Image (cartoon, helix red, strand yellow):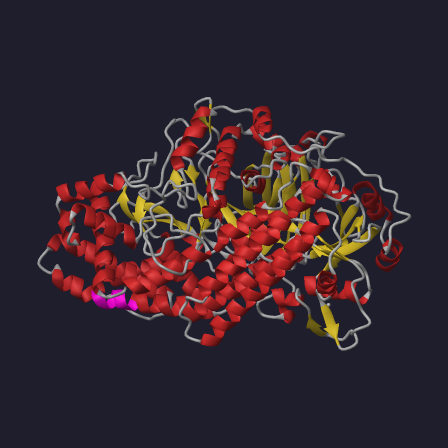
Amino acid sequence: MRHFVTMMLCLTLLVGAHAPQTHAQAGGSFDLQAYTNFLASHRDLTYEQLRGLHPTPNFRSKLDLTLTETAYLDTIIQLYQLTSDEQALLHENGFVVSERLRRDSFGHAFLEIYKHDLPVFVSTDAILHALHRSYDAILQDTETGVLIPRLQELLLKLRNEWPNLATRYVNLPTMQPMLNDVDVYLTVALRLLGNQLAPHRSENAATVTELLNLIGTEQPAYFSLFSETQRLIDFSQFRPRGHYTNQADLRNYFKAMIWLGRTELMLSPPKVQDGSEPSAADIQRQTIAAYLLWEAVQNSGSLPLWQEMDGIIRFLVGESDNITVDHLQLLADEIGLAGASELLDAGRLQALQSALAEKSYAMQRINSQILISDPNNPEQIAPPSAFLLLGQRFVIDSYVMGNVVYDRILYQDRKVLRMLPSSLDVLFALGNDAASILLQDELQRYPYASNLSALRYLVDSYEEEFWQSALYNVWLQAIRNLNPADDLTVFPAFMQTGAFWQQKMNTQLASWAQLRHDNLLYAKQSYTAGTTCLFPYSFVEPFPEFYRTLQSYAEQAEAKFNAVAFGEEWLKASITRYFSHMAGVMDTLAIIAGKQLHHEEPDSAEIRFLGRMMYSTPICGEQLDGWYAYLYYRGAEQSIEKDLVVADVHTQPTDESGALIGKVMHAGTGPLDLGVFIAENYEGKATAFIGPVMSYYEHVTMNFQRLTDEEWQQLDQQPPSFRPAWVNVYLADAEGKRRGAGPQIVTSVKEPQLASDLPKSLLLHQNYPNPFNANTLIRFEISPAFAHAPAKLAIYNLRGELVRELIDQTLPAGNYLVRWDGKNDSGNDTASSVYFCRLQVGNVSEMRKLTLLR
């Protein structure tokens, strides 16, 4: 039996003085030994023991508020025609969010509230969304203004150095394969970047062409890459996604960086269990190729270029999860290595490998390749020690997801076949104890409480240094600032309910999805608002540390971008000016949030500040202004743009039996929903505040399909949603009705609802587009009641004959997406006709009609 395990991608960037990264074991850095020791001392932990280690606050179940004396509530009910179910949720929880009241953007929603003269609810969602939109735009400007031209220059310098390498080693026949490897490596990178260049040696042209063709398939394939041994390479990662689909230079940059960020030159072999280990000769060959690249960097004068690029990415995302150019230099210095050819000597190679084995940076911490693990072998797989020129970055959330799936879970000394992680695993590891309650069924089916507890220990052990080391980590820290407090009594009543903290989970995960989306290329993925209008009152979600974290984020970014050598000075000025504005706004919001927590009245300047959050001039016209509008880097107009994004966050190559299936887990955001929140204003009177919040979605695709934002936006046009069931406790649906039962975190009144209590249904949605030509997307949902039952999805013709079997496997509860390309099981195109798609799970089935037009 064969099993593939892959893990997640993560990206990072840094500016400033360059220093070699050593994965130090300081309080601010990753400490693998501490994690391993904790895991060993907490073996076979049960769900109940995990809950005992991390108890939750005493959430209130229901408030049952008397709403008759609430200021502005009658106006909101009349203006927005709140339904009986929406009013009932407001009565129970002190707030309600409704999909019926969807809005395209925060800017439009705030302008609407402003023109209606209503009290405004300033959510952390609004701040985080502005952060995401601005970060993504600044990253794009940094790439086009700095990183792309630097990468072009770096690769051309290395290519131009290749003839010098060839001359240096012309009399060493045994060096020629490695020189060919470097020729192929650099040519593929330059071709992907858009340069129509041939390799120096004509005999390498066929290899370059074959690799480019495999990259074009965007599917996994076996290939003997720089070795005699084949390896299974996931070429689906080369599909441009996120903002990289916007223009040709970004698409090319994406592909070139995926090549440079994922193509390993191994210095030691991986631990695999299928007989595909590279030979000692393969490892020697790739080690020498790595040191040939090191020589090219040194001798071509390219080191400052590489350091600048690595520094920018390290500041933005984090350090590389691999051996870097700096590490090669450190190792060469330690053993006195003068050139790559010395490694032809077995003794010199052994000296290098022995020195490497003692280094904290020797091994990759996130497995992001397809490696095979035998479920009956107690040993666990491990990725190789590998050099990557611009390797993808270590991000802690990816590490979490990669360590709660097969084959990282051992229970009673046996491997546990949990093939996909949950986004709630990330929330728990980041300190949200309540997430474990919603994970009860999963933790009891797959006993991975020990892993989750050890990962929480690891994250909790990080000191301030780690959370300030990259903008990615500062963003994660802001998300952590939204975890439930131990003492909920300091908050307004609606914030003491379990329902509210489930809404904050939605905020946290929506922002996490945006974080992963914006950093798709660099983060290493694991594989398993004239003048007559006003806001009469404002309520700022009272999380002072959240705003202080983002103030720190802005101050760091302003300082670092001041050090970047942009080709256009106006671009640097725009970026630093934006971060200066952001820091000032966050400082003010932190002060106001602190006053709200302590029931202190804001001063007149702060009240004016809140009143000028978003407005239009003249006379309620459409010229946008206000401090919120300019929390968007590209200006006020960006605040009214619709924004739906998706990110693939984890890959499961095979099913439990070893069959290649290519499940890709996605996290995304959907339209904004208006919410109504009951809280006291600064005069102490109960008031209804209204404001927009984000929506979080998640689902799984098959066959290594990685969704682009454009595909995700098409899917959004088709109801219903792919939202986790735990949002039901506070959310009304598109008709203003209750969404039905859903899991709840423990409250002072009742325990959470278990999966067995939830509605028992399937849901096969209409395919989109329909009719279709080339291909169509088929979406379906499996409720917890049908989790892990045999599932089949197949296409039939009008005669009832099987045309194509799309899925035949057991599936966990969740939302799924499958593409049908209009071909039959033999790979031939089917004729124009009406077809039927049948979903069967257990003994229940549903069917939909599909129309294919050639």
**Quarter placement of the C terminus:** bottom right
Q: In this view, does 378 lie above or below 651?
A: above
Q: Is residue 683 left or right of residue 593?
A: right
Residue at point 54%, 49% (across, down): 476
User: Where does the image place residue 810, in percent across and percent down from the top left?
Assistant: 56, 35
Quadrant in the rendering for residue 521? bottom left
Please tell me which residue is depicted at 39% across the width and 60% down the height of the picture: 16
> Foreground residue, 616 or 769?
616
Q: Where is residue 96 in the image (x, y as percent from the top left)?
A: 78, 48
- Determine which quarter of the picture holds residue 833: bottom right
In the rendered image, residue 136, in percent from the top left (x then y), is placed at 53, 62
Q: Does the magenta stretch include residue 760?
A: no
Instruction: State which region is magenta.
Output: 156-161
Residue 257: give x, y in percent of width and height: 39, 59
Q: Can residue 241 be seen in this view?
A: no
184 vs 503, left or right, is left
Please state which of residues 290 and 308 is positioned toward the viewer in this rendering: 308
Most frequent secondary structure within the magenta stretch: helix
Height in image: 413 above or below 550?
above
User: Quick one: 601 or 432, which is closer to the camera?
Assistant: 601
Seen from this angle, which residue lies furthest bottom?
Answer: 618
Is residue 314 visible in this depiction of the protein? yes
Q: Residue furthest top?
A: 412
**Farthest left residue in view:** 171
Location of the N terminus (image quadrant): top left
Which residue does the image show at 74% across and 66% down from the upper left?
111
Instruction: Compare residues 728 and 97 and report the one nearer the observer.
Output: 97
